[in-house]
Image (tube, coloured by chain):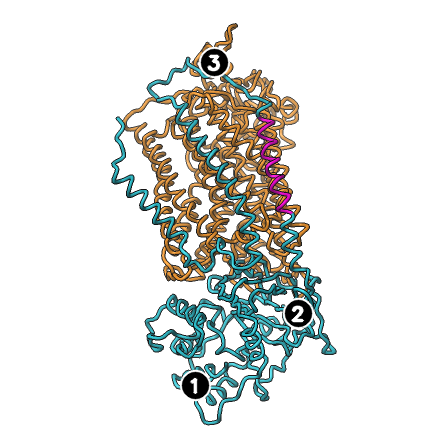
Chain colours: A orange, B cyan
């Protein structure tokens, strides 16, 4: 986005009503409605769609989880067949990781990060739309496997050689493979987009060490994605060739070593867990200072511990393989490395507690969920240390102890953090607060349900119950705690649904009962997103803010007296920009991201069912790429004065004036 | 207003907590990692004995601290005053350096004995070369082969190694993790399934591999787990302090019937083990002509012998075909290698306590009706445990009803994919009498 305080004088499309060359279509104009949502390149709408899509997939993954728990509630249950159970637990893990937690991080990063750095959009708005649509349509394609053969059945880790056509002949694993390959494109383009945004589009004065912690964590997350996703893509392409074209990458009879898959998968898979948790760490690093009414304790430590986690996350992948037979030297190295990744994580926990220490805490729902993350993630971190110890891990790996561990990290940690973020930023996004009373119920139901579900799994695992078991026997002594966990999971399901309920309930309260609008700064916020109106205007900032310090917005509201006392000099509402977007140009919507995204699943179905189908799919990909490239920088039919005063879409290298914009950004 | 908790509720809560704790600690948990019965599991448990309290202290400090800070610093919404800010502390470098270094030092402290233990546990496996005889080595090596969805054990009974090359010479190198694909297993070794029988109070070296996908061998009370990976040989060991039956479960997801791939390790006193091994080395006896069992044997030769091996000295049971002993063949013989002669060896079927991957008992306890179709799976398993614990099997009757159900339609008893070459196929053509004869024959295989 052009970070200029004056509208640019240069008119766009100054060649007048030019004739359109072949293959050039007008850009869509709809400002509202379905077509607008499908063609929008506005990072905020895309962020909302990421969030809504995650919630949709959360319902699918959650339903799978409940089916699993019903099956395991009693010994020797026949509620689900072995085949159905295997497919359901595989899809539960796959959906939750790739289609719920990862895109939730993307939702917050998309919506909040550009505003927090003072930008008007991300660096490449059309690519941003592509990232979302390719994720959503790829995710839908993956989920059509429920109806086309019953879902993948190899586990979300999908180990070779069980993932080969010889052992898993049904198409479930092909859907897993192709669907995630497609979703991976979205993660990859998204990461490049967001990294560029953070590095190049920050408001004047916002040096790296003045960025909010959430922006930092987003940056680290996107770097992790940038380097991790290609490794998974490589592994999946090898598997694709094995399954579809009889290649031998994982064929033991041809000398392949099945551990190759494990190494590739976990080199992706371990950074993956950090890229799921770091956005949530970023969120609570915004929430806790706001409601403790203190700055984050030890900002540099928070930033560098996040970066340290990002780097160390690459050196611990083989702790997933302590019993795979990788030899004692490797086990020693990875065991010690894994132990020490607890250090930067511990620093974060202690710094959050220190931020709360001596604060004046407002224990609203957002804050409660943030504290929930801090405490529950600690439990997950401690159990993590117990299986970083490799000898102990030989007893614990692939048992319910591990299931307990990573749910404490990813559900009690990441998802609690994201729900905290929902409550925190909801008024900014939609203009009304979520109901606090329902919110408290939501929080406590989730805390009770969560701990009742996953707490007993520690005991089950140590009592020897392996993971991924369709059933167990009453003689094994697992009955009691499985039953307790199932009760807990039902409470947890109700608790989680209350988040969605609260969103709608509060909306009706706001509309019907006529609750007042929240104003730009409902929480006495610290960062730039609270300096614009709620909901955020389409152009974000009327004028680009100039940043002088960390927590810049807060420092505009409060000053320190000569005697050291803090004094409020203005309210957020007074300081907030009025939201007048006149003269601000915005990138025009485009059809091509969704067309290109829709073409990829067609190729995918072709790979699975009939290679001829890849021809129209591939042609559509090419057509979409040409359409994208040839698309006019701005709508030629449109006069000036529609808010599109200046041509130039920043993902269009040939766009008029684009190079100038880029120079200004840098 | 604060309502005090009624005493009855408090007492009920305490009682419930006690009951739950008691239930958690009851010793009816055959896979409990907290009840080590062998030196390896004992070492791991002993090391963690020092770690759990450290984790507990950190747990209480951080969680308790977090809750305490939250409650102590809480400002009620009605008391909220935007002008009344707490001191704006930005950090304390000394403190932060301290809580970076202290955990690092603590973890380094844990790491030192941990690294020693990693090597220790490996060292013990490597101390005895496979096939080696001497101090601490009994010279008996056992190969554990995972297969969808049961375990095969091969005892190097003739002591010449597990494999044969083209000249019939034994080849063993347990440290070589590359498994030569063309080399066949030694047909002279003892082959059993599901239950690993070992002498008590001795470390038994295991060589782990798999015929198809990755499995994991785990007897929680004896040792941690180790994966069995096709194409690789992994070393591992088991040792039990006392004679007894120690149950386990495949712990790497291995496809459809992963949940029904169970096993056990049975430790016997040395003399009983020697007797057991001597018996296993014997060929199966041919039943007398004219008996039901003899009819069953004829039927076995026609219907079952293409997959199951019974070593007796007659030609119709001769394994002959090399595919029976080829561990891996994913090429053109892929399906044949998975099914042909790669089903459990039944030579001494009647000496085992369970079948079908450890999910059904071979014998029923006193007082149960073997023809009772209503017996559910859990009862079989429980009774099988009793059967194995009994000194003599005479009090127990063959679980014929379940055996017949299994032979007639195995996929209805345990999820399998016989059409894709995995698991046992159904035999709907067998009459009830034929099934009776087959069971009668199997019961003679002791």
Q: Residue B427 at x, y = what percent?
A: 45, 79
Check whether the beta carbons of the residues at disc 3 and disc 2 lie within 8 A of each other: no
Q: With respect to residue B384, does A85 lie above or below? A: above
Q: Residue B125 at x, y = what percent?
A: 65, 60
Q: Give residue A428's quadrant in the image.
A: top left
Residue B98 magenta-highlighted: yes
Q: Residues within 10 Å of mark 3 (few under 14, many from 20)?
A: some
Residue bearing mark 1: B437
Q: Choose between A476 and B199: the one closer to the eye.
A: B199
Q: How crowded is mark 1: few (under 14 residues within 10 Å), some or many (20 or more)?
A: many
Q: Choose between A490 and A222: the one closer to the eye.
A: A490
Residue A192 appears anywhere in the view:
no
The quarter of the rendered structure image containing the N terminus of chain A is: top right
Q: Give the range drawn in magenta.
A: B96-115
Q: How far apart are marks 3 and 2 (CA)?
A: 81 Å
Q: Give residue A272's quadrant in the image.
A: top right
Q: How far apart are marks 2 and 1 (CA)?
A: 40 Å
Q: What's the chain of the residue with tag 2? A: B
Q: Give the SS element for disc 2.
A: loop
> Which comes sooner in the sequence, label 2 or label 1?
2
Q: Nearer the viewer, mark 3 or mark 2?
A: 2
Q: Choose between A503 and A86: the one closer to the eye.
A: A86
Q: Distance between the residues labelled 3 and 1?
A: 92 Å
Q: Give the SS element for disc 3.
A: helix
Q: Nearer the viewer, mark 2 or mark 1?
A: 2
Q: Give the SS element for disc 1.
A: helix
Q: Which of marks 3 and 1 is in front?
A: 1
Residue bearing mark 2: B139
Residue bearing mark 3: A557
Q: In this view, does B221 lie to the left or right of A64?
A: right
Give the residue at the far bottom of this rendering. Answer: B290
Q: With respect to residue B64, does B82 lie above or below? A: above
């Amino acid at each position: 986005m052009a970070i200029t305080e004056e509208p640019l004088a240069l008119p766009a499309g100054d060649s007048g009503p030019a004739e359109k060359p072949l293959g050039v279509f007008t850009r869509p104009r709809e400002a509202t409605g379905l077509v607008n949502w499908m063609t929008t390149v506005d990072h905020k709408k895309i962020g909302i769609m990421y969030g809504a899509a995650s919630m949709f997939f959360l319902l699918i993954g959650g339903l799978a989880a409940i089916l699993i728990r019903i099956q395991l509630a009693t010994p020797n249950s026949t509620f689900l067949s072995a085949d159905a159970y295997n497919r359901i637990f595989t899809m539960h893990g796959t959906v939750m990781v790739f289609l719920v937690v990862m895109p939730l991080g993307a939702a917050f990063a998309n919506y909040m990060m550009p505003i927090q750095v003072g930008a008007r959009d991300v660096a490449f708005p059309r690519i941003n739309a592509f990232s979302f649509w390719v994720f959503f349509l790829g995710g839908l394609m993956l989920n059509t496997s429920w109806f086309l053969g019953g879902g993948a059945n190899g586990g979300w880790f999908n180990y070779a050689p069980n993932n080969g056509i010889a052992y898993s002949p049904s198409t479930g694993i092909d859907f897993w493979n192709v669907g995630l390959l497609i979703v991976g494109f979205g993660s990859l383009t998204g990461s490049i987009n967001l990294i560029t945004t953070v590095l190049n589009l920050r408001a004047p004065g916002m040096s790296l060490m003045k960025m909010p912690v959430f922006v930092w964590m987003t940056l680290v997350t996107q770097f992790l994605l940038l380097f991790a996703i290609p490794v998974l893509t490589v592994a999946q392409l090898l598997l694709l060739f094995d399954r579809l074209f009889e290649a031998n990458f994982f064929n033991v009879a041809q000398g392949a070593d099945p551990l190759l898959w494990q190494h590739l998968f976990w080199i992706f898979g371990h950074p993956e867990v950090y890229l799921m948790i770091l956005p949530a760490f970023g969120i609570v690093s915004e929430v806790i200072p706001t409601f403790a009414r203190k700055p984050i304790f030890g900002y540099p430590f928070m930033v560098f511990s996040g970066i340290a986690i990002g780097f160390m996350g690459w050196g611990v992948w083989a702790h997933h393989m302590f019993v795979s037979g990788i030899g004692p030297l490797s086990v020693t190295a990875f065991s010690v490395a894994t132990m020490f990744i607890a250090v930067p994580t511990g620093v974060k926990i202690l710094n959050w507690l220190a931020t709360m220490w001596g604060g004046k805490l407002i224990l609203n729902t957002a804050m409660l969920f943030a504290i929930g993350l801090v405490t529950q993630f600690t439990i997950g971190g401690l159990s993590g240390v117990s299986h970083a110890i490799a000898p102990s891990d030989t007893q614990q790996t692939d048992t319910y102890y591990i299931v307990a561990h990573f749910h404490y990290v990813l559900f009690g940690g990441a998802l609690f953090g994201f729900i905290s973020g929902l409550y925190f930023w909801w008024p900014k996004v939609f203009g009304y607060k979520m109901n606090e009373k329902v919110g408290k119920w939501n929080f406590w139901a989730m805390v009770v349900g969560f701990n009742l579900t996953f707490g007993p799994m520690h005991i089950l695992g140590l009592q020897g119950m392996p993971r991924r078991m369709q059933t167990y026997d009453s003689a094994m002594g697992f009955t009691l705690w499985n039953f307790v966990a199932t009760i807990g999971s039902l409470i947890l399901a109700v608790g989680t649904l209350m988040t969605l309920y609260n969103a709608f309930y509060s909306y009706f309260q706001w509309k019907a009962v006529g609750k007042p609008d929240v104003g730009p700064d409902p929480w006495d916020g610290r960062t730039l997103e609270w300096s614009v109106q709620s909901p955020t205007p389409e152009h974000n900032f009327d004028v680009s803010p100039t940043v002088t310090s960390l927590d810049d917005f807060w420092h505009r509201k409060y000053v320190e007296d000569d005697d050291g006392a803090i004094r409020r000099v203005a309210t957020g509402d007074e300081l907030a920009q009025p939201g007048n977007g006149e003269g601000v140009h915005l990138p025009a919507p485009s059809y091509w991201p969704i067309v290109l995204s829709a073409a990829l699943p067609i190729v995918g179905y072709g790979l699975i069912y009939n290679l001829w189908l890849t021809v129209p799919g591939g042609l559509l990909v090419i057509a979409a790429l040409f359409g994208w490239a040839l698309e006019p920088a701005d709508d030629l039919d449109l006069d000036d004065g529609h808010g599109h005063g200046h041509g130039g879409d920043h993902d269009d290298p040939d766009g008029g004036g684009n190079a100038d914009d880029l120079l200004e950004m840098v | 207003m604060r309502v005090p908790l009624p005493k009855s509720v408090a007492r009920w809560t305490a009682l419930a907590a006690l009951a739950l704790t008691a239930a958690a600690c009851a010793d009816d948990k055959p896979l409990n990692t907290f009840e080590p019965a062998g030196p390896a599991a004992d070492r791991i448990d002993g090391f963690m004995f020092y770690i759990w309290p450290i984790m507990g202290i950190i747990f209480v400090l951080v969680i308790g601290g977090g809750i305490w800070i939250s409650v102590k610093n809480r400002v009620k919404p009605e008391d909220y005053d935007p002008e009344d800010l707490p001191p704006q502390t930005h950090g304390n470098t000394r403190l932060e350096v301290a809580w970076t270094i202290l955990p690092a030092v603590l973890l380094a402290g844990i790491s030192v004995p941990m690294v020693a233990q990693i090597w220790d546990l490996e060292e013990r496996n490597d101390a005895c070369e496979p096939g080696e005889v001497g101090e601490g080595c009994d010279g008996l090596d056992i190969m554990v082969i995972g297969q969808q969805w049961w375990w095969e054990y091969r005892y190097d009974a003739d002591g010449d190694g597990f494999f044969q090359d083209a000249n019939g010479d034994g080849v063993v190198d347990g440290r070589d993790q590359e498994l030569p694909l063309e080399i066949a297993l030694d047909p002279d070794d003892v082959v059993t399934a599901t239950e690993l029988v070992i002498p008590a109070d001795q470390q038994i070296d295991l060589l782990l591999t798999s015929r198809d996908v990755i499995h994991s061998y785990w007897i929680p009370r004896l040792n941690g787990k180790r994966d069995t990976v096709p194409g690789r040989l992994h070393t591992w060991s088991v040792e039990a302090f006392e004679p007894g039956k120690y149950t386990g479960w495949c712990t790497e997801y291995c496809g459809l019937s992963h949940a029904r791939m169970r096993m056990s390790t049975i430790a016997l006193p040395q003399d009983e083990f020697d007797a057991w091994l001597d018996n296993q080395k014997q060929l199966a006896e041919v039943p007398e002509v004219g008996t039901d069992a003899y009819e069953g044997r004829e039927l076995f030769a026609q219907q079952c012998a293409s997959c199951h091996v019974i070593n007796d000295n007659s030609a119709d049971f001769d394994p002959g075909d090399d595919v029976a002993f080829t561990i891996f063949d994913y090429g053109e013989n892929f399906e044949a290698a998975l099914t042909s002669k790669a089903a459990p060896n039944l030579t001494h079927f009647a000496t085992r306590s369970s079948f079908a991957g450890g999910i059904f008992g071979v014998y029923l306890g006193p007082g149960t009706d073997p023809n009772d179709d209503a017996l559910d799976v859990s009862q079989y398993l429980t009774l099988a445990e009793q059967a194995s614990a009994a000194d003599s099997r005479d009090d127990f009757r063959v679980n014929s009803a379940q055996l017949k159900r299994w032979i007639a339609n195995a996929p209805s008893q345990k999820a399998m994919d016989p059409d894709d070459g995995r698991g046992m196929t159904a035999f709907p053509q067998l009459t009830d009498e034929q099934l009776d004869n087959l069971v009668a024959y199997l019961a003679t295989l002791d």
